Image (cartoon, coloured by chain):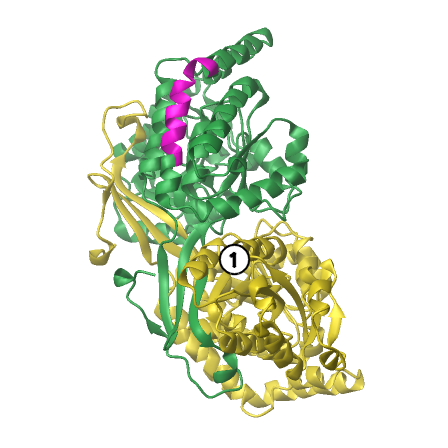
Chain colours: A yellow, B green
Amino acid sequence: MAEQIARNAHLASTVLKTLSNDERSQALDEIYKGLRLNRSVILKANELDMESAVKNNLSSSLIKRLDLSINDKFDTMCQGVLDVAALEDPLNKITLATKLDDGLNLFRLTCPIGVLLIIFESRPEVIANITALAIKSGNSAILKGGKESFHTFKAMSDVINEILIEKTAVPKDAIQLISTREEVGELLKQDQYVDLVIPRGSNELVRNIKSNTKIPVLGHADGICSIYVDEFADIEKAIKIIIDSKTNYPAGCNAAETLLINEKLIKTSAFLQIVEKLIEANVTLHLVPELLSLIPSSLLESKKFIEATEADFHKEFLSYDLAVKPIASTRDAIYHINSHSSKHTDVIITENKENAEIFLKGIDSSGVYWNCSSRFADGFKYGFGTEVGISTNKIHARGPVGLEGLVCYYYQLRGDGHVVGDYVGGGGSKVFKHEKIDIGTLNL
Amino acid sequence: MAEQIARNAHLASTVLKTLSNDERSQALDEIYKGLRLNRSVILKANELDMESAVKNNLSSSLIKRLDLSINDKFDTMCQGVLDVAALEDPLNKITLATKLDDGLNLFRLTCPIGVLLIIFESRPEVIANITALAIKSGNSAILKGGKESFHTFKAMSDVINEILIEKTAVPKDAIQLISTREEVGELLKQDQYVDLVIPRGSNELVRNIKSNTKIPVLGHADGICSIYVDEFADIEKAIKIIIDSKTNYPAGCNAAETLLINEKLIKTSAFLQIVEKLIEANVTLHLVPELLSLIPSSLLESKKFIEATEADFHKEFLSYDLAVKPIASTRDAIYHINSHSSKHTDVIITENKENAEIFLKGIDSSGVYWNCSSRFADGFKYGFGTEVGISTNKIHARGPVGLEGLVCYYYQLRGDGHVVGDYVGGGGSKVFKHEKIDIGTLNL
C-alpha cells in the first residue's frame, strides 16, 4: 500500500517535472477557484473536526488553530495559493553552461527533487500552502496531517484531486493524502521512491522521523539560538534585541534560549540593566553561580532567578526562560555557540565591526545575525513568500526553506556523435575546450 | 576515540572556515613543496606496501594502482595539489542579497559544509587530491584509505600534518587519517560532528555505508546507464556512441549497461547493423526473446548472445555485457529508464529535436545526454578540474562533484537594533521592503 502510494507519486513526478511554468501555475489558479467554490463543503468538514476536538477536550489554542472559519483564515489560505502561483519559476534555470568542445555543450539546469513526504500537525490551511509549493516546484507530495484535522484535510484533498483530474495537466497522484501513522512508518521505508521528508511539528516528531528513515530529512529538531552581547555592544540595542528574541514568541524555534555576556560588561552597570529589563519582561533567568552571586537581594525577590546547570545551555526552553553565562571574548562566544547551538540562528550585539565580522564568519549556523533579533529567521520575513520550514541541515538547504530549497539540478550534455575515445584520457588526442558560455544570451 | 577524532575535526573546521582564500591556497602550496621534498620517504613507504602486495598475491592491476613510482605519477599527484590551489575560491560568494528594511540587510553566502568523512580504496595519490579539495573548500576531512596502501598513506599524512603545523594557518586536525575499519564504523555514528560521508570505492562499500549511518552520504552505489536509440537516430552516430559508452572503460560507473532501441528500427537494417558492430567490438548482448529471434544463425555462431532476463535491465554489468530491448516511443523509453536506471547518466540518440527535448526534460537522472557518449560523465571532462566523486543523490549535489559540491550556504542578517516586534505579524506596524540588492557592487 505504502509502496503503491510512493510509486504512484514517483510516476506522477516524472510527468509533473515536464510541465511548463504556465501549466503548473494554471493548476494553482484552478485549485484557488476550486477551494473557494467548495468553501461550504470544506467548512462543514472542518466543523466535524471542531466537534471532535471539543468532545476530546483539546486545548483552546489547538481548537483555535483547527478552526478554518475564524476571521479571514479561509480567504487568506486561498490567496496564498495564488501568491505561490505568481512566484518566479524555480525550474529549468540554467546555472552553468560550458562548451566542452565544438558542438558539445554542457548545461546545468534546476529541476524538481522528485517526491516529497510532508508530515505536519493540526493547522489545516497548511495543506493548501504545501500543495501550492509542491506543484509550483514540480514535486509530487504525499501529505500526512494531524488526526485532529482529518475531516478538513480529507475534504480539501478531495477537492484538490478532483480539480487536478478535471482541469489541469498535473497528474492527480502528484498530491496524495495519507491518514494513518502506520502509513507514515511504511512510507519512511520507501527510499527508492521518496526523495525528501519534511516534518513540520514538534521536536519529538522530527527526531523520531530522523531516526527512522534512510531518506534525507529537511527540518530542525531543535532551535537553540544564542545571543552574544559583546564588550562593544550598545546596551539599549542589546536590551531591545534580547527581549524581542526571547519574548516576541517564546514557542518559536527562532526564539533565543541562551544569553552570553562579555565579562567586561559584567563588571559594569550594563549587566544589571539587562537583567532588570528581562525581569520586567517576565523572563526567568538561569544564571551560572558567578552571575547569580551578583544579583542584589531586591531583585532576587522577584523569584525569577534559577542557578543554571550545564544542561540549561543545551536546552530549547520554548518558554520565558533564558540561560545566561559570562564569556571572555568573541572567539570564546563562537566556541561556546558552535559546541552548544543547534545550528539554527545566533546573534552578536556589538558596535565593533571587526568582532562582528569574526562572529559572522565563525559561527556554524544557518543564520548568523549582527545587531538584530533572532526572530527574523523566517521565510516570509526573508522575502521568500512562504516557507516549507527551517532547516538546520548542513547540506542542500539551510535556514528558512522556500521554493529554491525544493529544487536541485541536473546536467544536460548536448553533442553530435561525440565519444570519449576521441579525447585525451579516453584513448584519443582531442583536447577539451572548457569555455564558459554566456548564460544571459542562452536559449536551449 | 572516534568521537575525539570527529570532535577535533569539527573544532578544526570552525577555524579553517574563517581562513582567507590566500591562507587556504598558501597551505596547499606548502603541501605541494612538502610532498616533493619528502618524495624519497613517501616512495620508501610505498615500497613497503608494494612488497606486502606481492607477498599477499594481490592482482597485478591492483599492484599497478598502488605503485606511486610509476612514470610521473608522483609529480602528477603533487601538481594536482597546485591545480586545486589555483581554482576560484568557492567560499564567501554572495548568492542572494535583500534589503529587508532600512539598515536591515540579508545576505546568503557560500560556506564549507564542515566535516567530511572520506573513505576510499587503494590508489594512494587520492589522499593528496582529497586533502587539497578539503582545505580549498574550508572543510575538515577524516580520511580512511585501503589497508593495502597503509604505509604510503601514513607517510603522506605525517608529511601533510607536519606541514600544516609548521607552515600554515590550517589547524592540523583539519586533515586526519584513520586506519582501521572499526574506526570507520564508530565514525559513522558521529552524526553530531561529521556532516557528510563520501565513499569512493566498490558498490558494496557504498551500499554498506549508506545502510549504516544517519549522516548524509554523497556518492553512488550503482551506475546503470542507458542509451535510447530513437526512430530518428543517425545510425552511424548511434553505433559510435553505443560502442564508446559500452567499451571505452566497461568498469566505469558511467559505462552503458542497457540499450533501448525504437521498435521502428528493429524492422529495418539498422538493428542488425548495430548488433554486428557490437559483436565486432566484443560485446555480449543480452537480448529479449523477440530480438533474439531476429538474429541470423551466422551471427549466433559468435556465441555473443544471451536471452535477457528482467533482472538484466536492473544490472550494472561492469563488463562487455549489454542488455537490449525494443521500445515503442520516447515516452516509453523515459518510463523504462526512470523505473530502471540508477539516476546516473542516460542518453538519447536522435536527430529529432522534439524527442530530444522531451527526453532531456523527462529523465530523472543527474546527467541526461543527447547524441554523445555516457562516458563524458566525469568531473575532469566537465571542466571542474577534479572531482570527489559522482553523486546519484536527489538533493544537494548531483553528477560529478567538484569544489562546489563541498560547499553549502548560510544567511547573514546585518541590522542596527532591529526587532520583529516592530513589524506587521510580530506585533508592530512596520512593513518589510524586500528590495533586491545588486550583488555586483557589493562589498560587505
Up-down relation of residue A116 to residue A70 (above or below): above
Up-down relation of residue A411 to residue B95 (above or below): above
Magenta highlight: main SS: helix
Residue drawn at the location 33% of the way across and 58% of the way down: A93
Quadrant of the rendering where the N terminus of chain A is positioned? bottom right
Quadrant of the rendering where the C terminus of chain A is positioned? bottom left
Q: Which residue is mark 1?
A: A330
B154 vs B385, nearest the viewer: B154
Position of residue B96 in the picture relative to residue B440 (left or right): right
Estimate the x, y position of residue A187 in percent, counting from the top left. 65, 57
Count of marks overlaid on the render: 1
Q: Quadrant of residue A51?
A: bottom right
Q: Subunit of mark 1?
A: A
Residue with the most extreme bottom position: A71
Residue drawn at the location 66% of the way across and 40% of the way down: B3
A84 vs B364, nearest the viewer: A84
Query: Where are the magenta residues, as a range?
Result: B27-41
Q: Quadrant of residue A118?
A: bottom right
The amino acid marked with disc number 1 is Thr
Estimate the x, y position of residue A406 in percent, counting from the top left. 47, 61
Estimate the x, y position of residue B93 in percent, counting from the top left. 36, 54
Q: Is residue A401 visible?
A: no
Q: Is residue B421 visible?
A: yes
Residue drawn at the location 32% of the way across and 70% of the way down: B436
User: How many residues crowd mark 1 within 10 Å: few (<14), some (14–19), many (20+)?
Assistant: many
